[in-house]
Every structure is written in structure tokens, then in C-alpha cells.
Amino acid sequence: MNVKESSPEKHVAVLAFPFGSHPLSLWNLVCKLAQASPTVHFSFLNTGKSNSSLFTTAKADVPHNTKAYDVTDGMPEGHVLSRNPLEAVDLFLKVSPENFKRGIDVAVEETGMRISCLISDGFLTFAANVAEDMHVPWIPIWSPLPCSLSAHIYTELIRHHFVSSKAGAGLEVEDATLEFVPGLSQMRVSDLPEELLSRNLEGESLFSRTLSQIGLVLPRASAVVLNSYEELNPPLLSRDLKLKFQNVLNMGKRKGRFAYVSFGTAASPPPNELIAIAEALEASGIPFLWSLKDDLKDLLPKGFVEKTGMKGKMVPWAPQLQVLEHASITVFVTHGGSNSVFESIAYGVPMICRPFFGDHHMTSRMVEEVWGIGVKVAGGILTKSELLKSLELVLGHEKGKEMRDKAQALKHTVQEAASPDGTAAKDFSYLVELISVS
């Protein structure tokens, strides 16, 4: 891969998907790239609301060669969102890519520098056309696990196998495995994102239609960046992705008996499961740290906070990396989001996964069956007995010792991959060269 040396007039536009943990993952990569490429200017385009939240959360200083710009989110003035989580996503996609094009125009006029490369979240498939119109390389960033990318690549094949051609028909066999998809033989149909299984049904969301284009559009990219380490993927999966794309760059994040409970910023268990978690933590006697928003504490059993005050602590937000890094944390009760899972792997902490939506189910399957570093709660619902059983398994049984040993082994694998001579470092160096090419 021969890439020309950088010139001082490079200007990279970065398009964010302003939902969940996607913007933070992308921003962290941009900061790392900006520090490694001081002569390249980065314009980070995101919605105003997401930028405001991001720069409240992100503690690191903004690099001197980076500036954030706000783009419209498509929300009508005075509009009240329904309980459908995809409504905000669809409103945003309806005004895209025009909102980003306007933001790019502002950044170009302000800097006096034409765009030389376009980086985007992998969900923003329209970025391929934007890049081609500007005659610049396009580099999508895939934040979830690579197994979910593979599922989107093989969407039509999966639908052909498991979805009836009749409108409104459901799955034929939820427990069937995806043995016909390279590297996904341990995944089940029930693990797949709901959006992936719809077949142009009436009322299908714009987000679902966008996701269905991933397998067709991403091969046009100059490189696809995965928030992972190649060593964590099944070999068949890695080999197949390399055949599908021009370049695949893996650059995942590095980052006593004590339980850490957190379900991220977008997922929240229903009241009956919050009660079950509280009852299980109290009955287990295990010291815990529970990240739970203040407005949900009233749903917990009466007296729970007082009775567990000597062993447990509840906070509305926790610095997750610092928590997982602590030697006392021996199990992480999580929603199975890819960022949380990678952070847990980075510090060798086994997991109990309660998936909610999107890629959570596939990620949890990787945790339980591919890596063997945790369990996915039976039936996908947390009950007192199920959580107690899972805690006992991870923390006490011989099976739990195997999980802890495997978690430590994966931790060392990730550390090696992220070392200066590791595979992730080499892929990052190539990405730096790629955005600096003339």
C-alpha cells in the first residue's frame, strides 16, 4: 500500500451519526488522528444537540487542528417525539445529506481549504455519493462489532433463508443458526437486529432502508475501519470481510468480587427488571456499583437503597473505563453494547449481558459462545433468580473460572494488538497515510 506523503493543505470532513455511543467513538478516533496528523485539518459535523452532549462527556482537549460544526437534526419546531426510538433517527435521515453538505460548505469557506477526504459513520451510506461528487476518498467507520457488519452485508441472503415473501410474515425458525454466513455459524436468527429482517414492508422505517444498503455501498469505500481487533474475530469472518472491501482496518479501543451494573445511555430495563436486579443484588450480598438515573430510583423496592448502603453504591453516571479498570470489579452486568463490551474486554472483566435492541443480541452471543467470557441472560429478561444464577456462575463455579481466565487472555490479546508493533497500530498508521494522500 504505497501512499504519498502528506501536504499541509489536507482537510478531512467527518460525518457523525448522532445517536447512542456512535458520536463519542467517532470523536475519539478523530482526536487520535488529529494528534497523529498535525498538518491535516478535521471538520467534525454533528447535530447541535449531540455535539453539546458529546463535549460535556468528552474530557480531552479539542486538538488545535479540529473544529466541530452543528448540522440540523430535522426535528420540526415544537415537535414532541413519540416513544418510537427510530422516529428521531428517521427525522434526521430525511434531512440528510443536505444538512451535511451545508455544513461542509461552511467548513470549506471558513478554512479556505477544499475537502480532501470524507470520513463518516458506517450507518451513513449516503456519504458514498457525497464523496464521489467531491472526488475524494470515503472511509466509513463501523462502531458495532464486525459480526453485525457481516449480517448487514448478507441481508438479502438471510432474508431469503428465513423471511417469508408474504408481507407481514415473521421468522420461520428463530433458533436457526447462520451457518451459511462466513464466521457467523454460532449466531442465531433471534440475535439479528429487527431492522435487518424486514423486507420492504409497508411502513418500514427510513433507517431500516438505509441499513439494507450497507452491503451494497460500503464496498465502494477506500477503506472500512472497524472498532475492533482482528484477533477477536472468527478467522472466517475476517477473511470474508477482506474479500468484500478494498481495505479493512482494525483499530479497536484500548482503553475482590465487585459487580458493576450499567446499561448505557440509550437502554433502560423496564420496572419489573429494575426490581429484579435490586432484589438479586441484595440477596447475593455482592458489593456493587450501579449506574442508574435518579428518576428511576423510585421504581426500586422500598428500602433497597438503605438496606444495601453498606455494600452498594448507586450513581446517576459513572466513568466506565475507570470503573472497569479497578481490580475489584469482577463482573459487568451490561446491555451488550459494543463499546461497553470492548471496554470490559480491555480490562479482562467477564460479563452478564441483557441485550435490548440493534446489535446487542449479536454482541452478547459473541460474549457467551464465541469468546466464552460471559453469559447472556436466559430468555432475554432479567429475573431475580436468573441474575442470581448468572452471578453465581460467573463468580463462583468452575465455568466462571474458565470465563475469567478467557477474559484475561483476551485482555492480553487486545493489549498486544494495540501495542506499537501490533496489528491495530499498523492499521491506524495506514489510515493516517490514507487521509493524507494527495
Image (cartoon, rainbow, N blue to C red):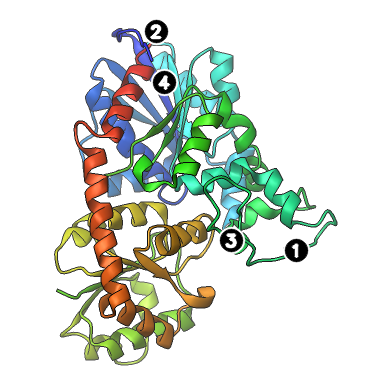
Which label's residue is closer to the chain start, 2 or 1? 1
Quarter of the figure with residue 401: bottom left
Q: CA distance from mark 2 to mark 1?
A: 50 Å
Q: Quick check: can you spot residue 382?
A: yes
Mark 2 or mark 3: name the one nearer the start of the chain.
3
**Picture quarter with the N terminus:** top left
Q: Which residue is mark 4?
A: 107
Upstream in sequence: badge 3 or badge 1: 1
Looking at the image, do the residues carrying marks 4 and 2 touch, with CB atoms under 8 Å apart? no
Which marked residue is nearer to the observer: mark 3 or mark 4? 3
Amino acid type of the residue tagged 2 in the rendering: Ser
- As drawn, 150 above or below 99: below
Task: Check disc 1: other Cα within 10 Å, few if <14, some if 14-19, many if 20+.
Answer: some
- In the image, residue 292 sits, relative to residue 3, either above or below, namely below
Task: Please identify the quarter of the rendering in which residue 83 is found.
Answer: bottom right
Q: Amino acid at mark 4?
A: Ala
Q: Hey, what amino acid is under mark 1?
A: Gly
Mark 3 or mark 4: name the one nearer the start of the chain.
4
Discs 3/1, front: 3
Residue located 23% across and 24% down the image? 36
- Looking at the image, residue 400 lies above or below residue 298: above
* Circle 4 SS class: helix
The residue indicated by pointer 1 is 170
70, 76: nearer the viewer: 70
Query: Percent from the top left, x then y, of residue 436?
Result: 34, 14
Q: Nearer the viewer, mark 2 or mark 1?
A: 1
Q: Quadrant of the C terminus?
A: top left
Please tell me which residue lies in front, 293 or 143. 143
Label 3 sits on residue: 188
Crowdedness near tag 4: few (<14), some (14–19) or many (≥20) residues, C-alpha within 10 Å: many
> What's the residue at 61%, 30% (across, down)?
217
